[in-house]
Image (cartoon, grey):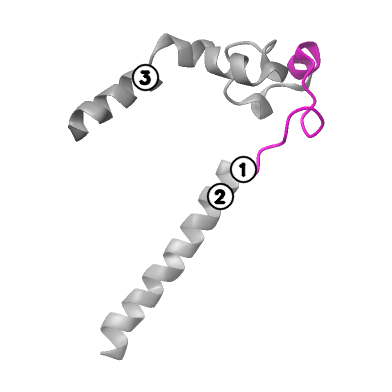
Amino acid sequence: MILMWVLYEWFNINNIDYFQGVFVRTWCPELARLSNEYIQTPWLAPPHILKEAGVELGVNYPRPIIIVSQWNQQVNFYMILVLIYVYISIFLVS
């Protein structure tokens, strides 16, 4: 049963509607005029593309809350700290 659900979700997310942005264009009309290339990540679009589509980040469409590249760097830093803590706890204290 779980395998069927996973396959269903995988096929759903990889279907043509996702890449053409049908869902986004339906439920986020402010992004409807963006090209397929930037419909899923409008904050990566160049300013002239956003202007042509009538999208103003922070005005009629929110800026991203998390910037993935910065988040990855922070997670890597904290993971190193956790590993050092675990190493000290296991090998040096006991």
User: Which residue is disc 2 drawn over?
Assistant: 71
In this rendering, position of residue 15 left or right of residue 28: left
Q: Position of residue 93 (x, y in %)?
A: 31, 90
- Tag 2: residue type? Trp
- Tag 1: residue type? Ile
Our reading of the magenta stretch's main secondary structure is loop
* Membership of 21 in magenta stretch: no
* Residue 61 seen anywhere in this rendered image of the structure: yes
User: Which residue is disc 1 drawn over?
Assistant: 67
User: Which residue is disc 3 drawn over?
Assistant: 12
Q: Which residues are magenta?
A: 48-67
Q: Quadrant of residue 4?
A: top left
* Membership of 49 in magenta stretch: yes
Q: Residue at 48% of width from left, 64% of height from top? A: 78
Q: Residue at 81% of width from left, 16% of height from top? A: 51
Tag in front: 1 or 3:
3
